[in-house]
Amino acid sequence: MGHRLAIFASLLEINPRANLTVFSPALYKGSGYKSLSEYSRMKVSLRATYGIIAAVDLALHDHDVPVQAKTIARRQGIPARFLEQVLHAMKKAGLVVSQRGAQGGYALNRKPQDLSLASILEVLEGPLTETNGRERRIPGARAQRQDALLAHVWDRIKQAELNILAEITVDQLASRQRQLEQQRSLMYHI
């Protein structure tokens, strides 16, 4: 479970290219929000989260040998049956390839540096082009005025989210995960 949280936390921390903080635990802690989903307008399904984590795991353990889903599930604390469904959807979309048999398993179909989080989310959650402003339509004259007032703000936020997801690659998250594991191992040796 620790790997899963560390990988996802690194996704939410910083986009190095844009130098933009997407989520900072320091900001969140004193913000008055009860949960991360309340803090962030973006909602990511468990299916998509597991897909990202599986892709990062495959990038970390790619030694020219396919990795079995049950091995990924065990390492990441993900239910194996659910992970199989996620990997099947990713295979169907061409993000991963599979090999059957005793030595079978899954491997990334692209180089980790060529696989963005946006492409994984699109496969597992559908098109990411909808805007938050249009999704939040509320009946009533006052609500329509408020919606019209804030729609462009939500659209800009959504576009920024999409840009960040398109820029962050599986390779970047795998590198971040290696750093976190290295820091964790150093702490045990002190």
Image: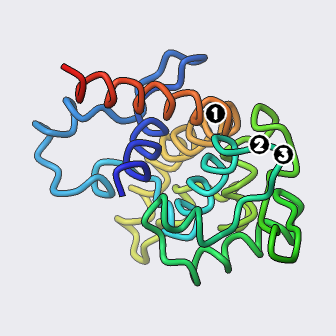
Residue type pointed to by label 1: Ile
How many angstroms separate mark 1 from mark 2 (CA)? Answer: 23 Å
| Residue placed under numbered mark 1 in the picture | 168
Q: Residue at x 51, y 30 (%)?
A: 178
Q: Position of residue 135 (x, y in %)?
A: 54, 66
Residue 61 position by quadrant: top right
| Residue placed under numbered mark 2 in the picture | 63
Please tell me whether mark 3 sits on a helix, a strand or a loop. Answer: loop
Residues at marks 1 and 2 touching, judged by CB atoms closer than 8 Å = no
Q: Residues within 10 Å of mark 2 (few under 14, many from 20)?
A: few
Q: Earlier in the sequence, mark 1 or mark 2?
A: 2
Residue type pointed to by label 2: His
Q: Residue at x 49, y 34 (%)?
A: 177
| Nearer to the camera, 186 or 26 | 186
Residue 175 position by quadrant: top right
| Residue placed under numbered mark 3 in the picture | 64
Please tell me whether mark 2 sits on a helix, a strand or a loop. Answer: loop
Q: Is residue 29 above or below residue 78?
A: above
| Nearer to the camera, 103 or 90 | 103
